[in-house]
Image: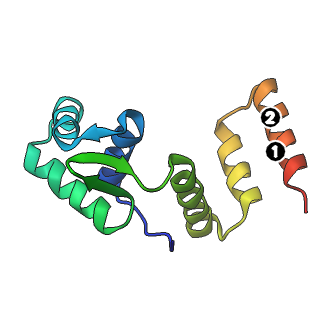
Amino acid sequence: MEYVKLFDAEYRVMQIIWDNEPLTSRELSEICFNELSWQRTTTYTMLKRLIQKGYAQNEKKIVSSLISREEVQKNESKDFVEKNFAGSLYSFIAAFTTDNKLDEEEIKKIKKLISDSKK
């Protein structure tokens, strides 16, 4: 599937779906009302967009995701680094760690990620 970017509101609905799936469209509407103060029609409009983009399905009023949270995070991250740092992961990490100091556990995990990802 070719990656289609999610808008912030769509991503918020997907987070609710991932956290609660499978759920009825009514349950989705209730959660969106409680968490986002959205009316039912707004939730259903967002759900329709997510279905059209291939992120979710609504079969017999049961809503579930068609793409994992991890896949979306991977694509969103790639897009962000490409757009804001010319694709340079180093530039992103350098910018991020300027004001956000990492603790020893985070550094250890990042080193392991780098080691595991060597070509």
Image point (64%, 65%), residue name: 85
Instruction: Please identify the quarter of the rendering in which residue 104 is found.
Output: top right
Amino acid under disc 2:
Lys
Image point (77%, 57%), residue name: 90
Horizontal and vertical percent position of residue 64: 35, 47
The residue sitting at the bottom extreme is: 2
86 horizontally vs 41: left or right = right
Q: Secondary structure at mark 2?
A: helix
Q: Nearer the viewer, residue 88 or 55?
A: 55
Q: How is the image coloured?
A: rainbow
Horizontal and vertical percent position of residue 113: 81, 44
Q: Is residue 43 above or below residue 16?
A: below
Instruction: Please identify the quarter of the rendering in which residue 77 is found.
Output: bottom right
Q: How many labels sit on residues?
A: 2
Marks 2 and 1, how far apart at CA: 6 Å
45 horizontally vs 77: left or right = left
Q: Is residue 75 above or below residue 69?
A: below
* Pointer 2 residue: 109
Amino acid under disc 1:
Leu
36 horizontally vs 88: left or right = left
Image point (29%, 51%), residue name: 9
Instruction: Please identify the quarter of the rendering in which residue 97 is found.
Output: top right
Q: Residues within 10 Å of mark 1 (few under 14, many from 20)?
A: few
Q: Is residue 42 above or below residue 86?
A: above
Q: Which image quarter is the C terminus in? A: bottom right
Image point (73%, 59%), residue name: 89
* Pointer 1 residue: 113
Q: Nearer the viewer, residue 43 or 114?
A: 43
Q: Cβ–Cβ below 8 Å for labels 2 and 1?
A: yes
Q: Is residue 55 above or below residue 103?
A: below
